[in-house]
């Protein structure tokens, strides 16, 4: 624990006049070079956490440690962090190069070295030759790159990104997603980024912390979060799902009222009620499997690479995603058999 | 929107008349200033630059002009400095007595100048500051600071707080954030406030009349005193000079920084 690069312990922020805390006893840590996503709906406290780490907001209680140092007594400008803002927050009265050089200037880096490092930072974000431009002459994506260069040039001990992609259009967003990941990997900078976009979090972060109402619901690798959601909130927030409630009657078997026996791969205590989750794309059609449910296709949407079905099985409806390469596709009103392997039935709360 | 031709014409005429109404006094003063007679009358009979020559030969006017310029400059700088500090406090911090400061800042807008004048006489006399530079500067600061607070506050409110935060996070001390980021961004408001303060001080008569006598008389008080004994085109000529100075200041600044954007 002690040798982690970033350690956040029991962090709380309660704003005066508001009853419930905005951030409620949050714990997490980061290894050096790791990228952590704080993911959650707006108002869940993720940005408040980021701003507390930066020092822009004072925590009500709790500790933030960076590289072994307690941040409580260290003012914002001495924390040696970089931050990329949602609105970029570039200095509008300075050129691109002046923006990037700012942090170095504040650290008293000599002029010649400064120029060289600015040049390298602009290279890194593919803005070579843009140094003399005004901020207003840059496109949204270029402003984004400039903001990243400004944060990285100071070689921060921690890079903070606050919804860095939400002001970009969809195509550029995908591009920058990979680029930020690439830059982060190349510089080896430790980073925390805040987002409400699950795709972004899953594809960019080494680990993600899913938040709701000021608390971390679950923290883990993208795979753990997706396949082994700790709570129903996490299962719902990340991807779609079919939820079943049943009682464990035998090892790996639950009786789901109105559906029958469902087999699952994880361990769950006998006699207990469990919530089961099946992701829509884990179903197969008319195949073989331990869990087979007969039903009727009530509705279908063709999405090019997937076919989304609503299948009525007894008194419930399953959401099913099928790949479209699978030969003949079912039509509305067809009787189908859905199958799902036991390892694709997740028991919520058995986080691995 | 489609507008009929007569309606358009009527609208333009109305605007034209409005301009005439507003500018008529200035135009008449301008014409009268070239009259050769020793009293103010319209229209003039014959024209010359004689009054202008006399104005520039009038030692009282010239020394009062330099005094006004100096006082205006000090007031402009002072009002901007104090106004910026007050604006920072009002827009950036919440503090006890914020409402009181807010009220104090707009009070000079509400209280008639003549009342302020009487009050200032009583206060300044107690400190022996009547008819002194510090006395008149203090009085003018009191009535100009509300304007600088307004212009600077408006500029401050348009500054994105995230930009200041970005500077702070990337290593600028709070002082450097102000010096390198905030100050350059609110410069239009500061310059506009300074110019307005200067112009108000340069032009202020009512309060000055209470405070100044011989040693610190400003140009407007000098004109007022002159008018008590004589009414000749010199006054018109001097007025034209004053108008031209004000216009010149505004034009230069408009060209330099776009004053209209800042006010």
Image (spheres, coloured by chain):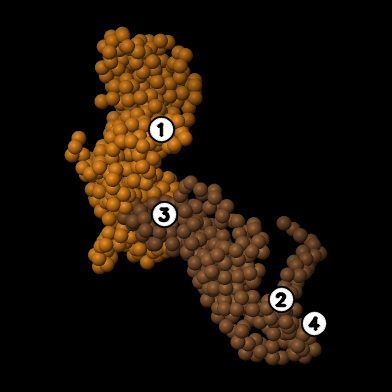
> Closer to the camera: disc 3 or disc 1?
1
| CA–CA distance in space, label 3 to label 2 | 46 Å
In this view, the residue in front, A271 or B118, is B118
Q: Secondary structure at mark 3?
A: helix
Q: Quadrant of residue A58?
A: top left
Choose the circle earlier in sequence order: 4 or 3.
4
> Closer to the camera: disc 3 or disc 2?
2
Tags 2 and 1 on a common chain: no
Q: Position of residue B89 (x, y in %)?
A: 47, 53
Choose the circle earlier in sequence order: 3 or 2.
2
Camera sees residue B3: yes
Q: Colour in which chain A is shown?
A: orange
Numbered mark located on residue B42 in the image? 4
Chain letter, disc 2 residue: B
Residue receiving disc 1? A21
In this rendering, is residue B191 above or below A142? Answer: below
| CA–CA distance in space, label 1 to label 4 | 76 Å
């Amino acid at each position: 624990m002690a040798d982690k690069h970033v350690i956040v312990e029991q962090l709380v922020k309660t704003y005066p006049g508001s009853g419930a805390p905005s951030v409620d006893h949050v714990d997490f840590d980061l290894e050096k070079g790791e990228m952590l996503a704080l993911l959650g709906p707006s108002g869940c406290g993720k940005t408040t956490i980021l701003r507390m780490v930066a020092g822009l907001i004072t925590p009500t209680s709790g500790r933030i440690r960076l590289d072994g140092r307690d941040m409580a007594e260290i003012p914002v400008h001495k924390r040696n962090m970089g931050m990329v803002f949602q609105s970029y927050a570039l200095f509008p009265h300075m050129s691109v190069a002046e923006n990037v050089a700012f942090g170095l200037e504040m650290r008293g880096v000599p002029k010649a070295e400064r120029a060289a490092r600015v040049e390298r930072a602009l290279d890194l974000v593919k803005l070579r030759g843009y140094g003399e431009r005004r901020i207003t002459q840059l496109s949204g994506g270029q402003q984004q790159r400039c903001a990243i260069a400004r944060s990285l040039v100071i070689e921060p001990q921690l890079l903070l990104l606050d919804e860095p992609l939400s002001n970009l259009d969809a195509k550029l967003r995908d591009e920058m997603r990979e680029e930020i990941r690439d830059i982060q990997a190349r510089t080896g900078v430790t980073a925390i980024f805040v987002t409400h976009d699950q795709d972004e979090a899953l594809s960019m972060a080494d680990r993600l912390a899913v938040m709701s109402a000021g608390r971390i619901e679950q923290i883990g690798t993208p795979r753990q979060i997706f396949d082994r959601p700790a709570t129903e909130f996490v299962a719902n927030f990340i991807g779609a799902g079919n939820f079943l409630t049943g009682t464990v009657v035998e090892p790996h078997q639950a009786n789901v009222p109105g559906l029958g026996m469902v087999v699952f791969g994880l361990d769950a205590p006998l006699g207990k009620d469990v919530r089961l989750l099946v992701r829509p794309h884990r179903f197969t059609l008319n195949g073989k499997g331990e869990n087979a449910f007969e039903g009727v296709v009530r509705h279908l949407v063709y999405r090019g690479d997937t076919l989304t079905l609503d299948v009525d099985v007894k008194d419930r409806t399953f959401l099913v995603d099928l790949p479209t390469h699978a030969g003949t596709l079912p039509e509305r009103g067809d009787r189908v058999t859905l199958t799902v392997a036991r390892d694709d039935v997740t028991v919520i709360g058995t986080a691995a | 929107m489609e507008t009929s031709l007569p309606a358009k014409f009527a609208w333009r005429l109305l605007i034209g008349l409005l301009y005439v109404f507003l500018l008529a006094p200035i135009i008449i003063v301008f014409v009268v200033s070239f009259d050769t007679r020793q009293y103010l009358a319209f229209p003039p009979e014959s024209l010359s630059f004689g009054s202008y020559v006399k104005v520039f030969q009038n030692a009282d006017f010239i020394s009062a002009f330099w005094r006004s310029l100096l006082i205006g400059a000090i007031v402009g700088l002072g009002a901007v400095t104090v106004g910026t500090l007050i604006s920072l406090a009002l827009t950036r911090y919440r503090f006890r007595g914020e409402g009181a400061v807010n009220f104090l800042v707009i009070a000079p807008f509400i209280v008639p100048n003549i009342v302020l004048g009487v009050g200032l006489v009583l206060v300044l006399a107690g400190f022996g500051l009547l008819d002194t530079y510090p006395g008149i500067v203090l009085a003018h600061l009191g009535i100009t600071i509300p304007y600088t607070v307004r212009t600077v506050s408006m500029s401050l409110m348009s500054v994105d707080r995230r930009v200041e935060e970005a500077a702070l996070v990337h290593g600028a001390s709070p002082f450097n954030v102000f010096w390198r980021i905030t100050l350059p961004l609110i410069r239009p408001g500061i310059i506009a406030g300074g110019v307005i303060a200067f112009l108000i001080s340069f032009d202020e008569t009512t309060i000055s009349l209470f405070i100044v006598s011989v040693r610190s008389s400003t140009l407007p008080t000098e004109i007022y005193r002159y008018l008590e004994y004589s009414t000749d085109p010199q006054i018109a000529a001097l007025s034209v000079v004053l108008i031209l100075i004000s216009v010149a200041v505004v034009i230069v600044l408009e060209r330099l920084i776009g004053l209209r954007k800042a006010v």
